[in-house]
Amino acid sequence: MIKCILFDLGGVIIDYTDDRYFYPYLARVSGVPVKKVWHTIQNRMEARLDTGQINLRDFNRAVANRLGIKPSQVKWYEMHRDNSRINRGTMGVVRRLHKRYSVSYLSNVDRSRYEWSTKLLRPYLKFFEHRFASCEIGMRKPSAAIYRYALRHMGFGGREVIFIDNLEENVRGARRAGIKSVLFKSPRQLERALKHIGVRL
């Protein structure tokens, strides 16, 4: 029996993805192809930032060094701050789910972006019973450990939870941890997927 819906933040609750904003921006200012920019950031650097192993200043310096730009041009936090918005459609789904289920979120996010995200979420935090951020717990999706951590602290078994994320690798990670998962594409698609599983909206 489903008792809990566990959401990702970026790209699901918050309408922002690095693929849409950050990587194209860095490609423009550096002259480096987007694909190479992606590999530069994803080569463990973002994971280290999200789990608190490095701070934002060191991250900016490392990215700038690899792309041949100034650290002030990286704008990891600024791009998120200036372009992120609440996804109203998804939040409408959250409001409806909250009436029947425990709703929580689990996000890969560094401290600077998480502080901004919580400002955006302030009017809606009452809908989220548990709030898990990689920068606070030192683990990151799609590691099985972070899903187990969330299950343990929420007090639910894997079969009682549905996880929603916009990244396939995170959905697969949750499934490996025994959690039924939905790959998010849009609020309308999410509603259909949840109803198909048997979730009441």
Image (cartoon, rainbow, N blue to C red):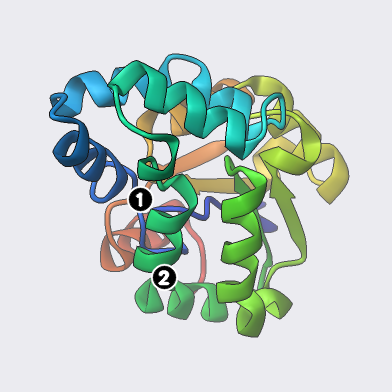
Quarter-of-image position of residue 16? bottom left
Which kind of residue does numbered mark 1 sit on? Phe
* Percent x, y of residue 124: 62, 80
Residue lying furthest front = 70
Q: Residue at x 61, y 43 (%)?
A: 110
Q: Is residue 90 visible?
A: yes
Horizontal side of residue 30 vs 148, given as left or right: left
Mark 1 crowdedness (10 Å alpha carbons): few <14, some 14-19, many ≥20: many
Q: Which residue is mark 1?
A: 184
Mark 1 vs 2, N-terminal side: 2
**Residue at 36% from the left image edge and 31% from the top image edge:** 168
- In x, y percent, where is residue 196? 37, 55
Percent from the top left, x then y, of residue 184? 35, 50
Image location (x, y in percent) of residue 93: 46, 74
Observer-nearest residue: 193 or 187?
187
User: Can residue 141 be seen here?
Assistant: no
Asked if labels 2 and 1 touch by Cβ distance under 8 angstroms, the answer is yes
Answer above or below: position of 74 versus 15: above
Q: Which residue corresponds to the image point at 69% horizontal and 36% vertical from the top-left? A: 158
Q: Residues within 10 Å of mark 2 (few under 14, many from 20)?
A: many
Residue occupying image coordinates x 69% and y 75%: 125
Residue 136 vs 123, above or below: the answer is above
The label number, if any, that marks residue 90 in the structure image? 2
Depth check, front residue: 179 or 39:
39
Q: Quadrant of residue 176?
A: top right
Q: Secondary structure at mark 1?
A: loop
- Disc number at residue 158? none
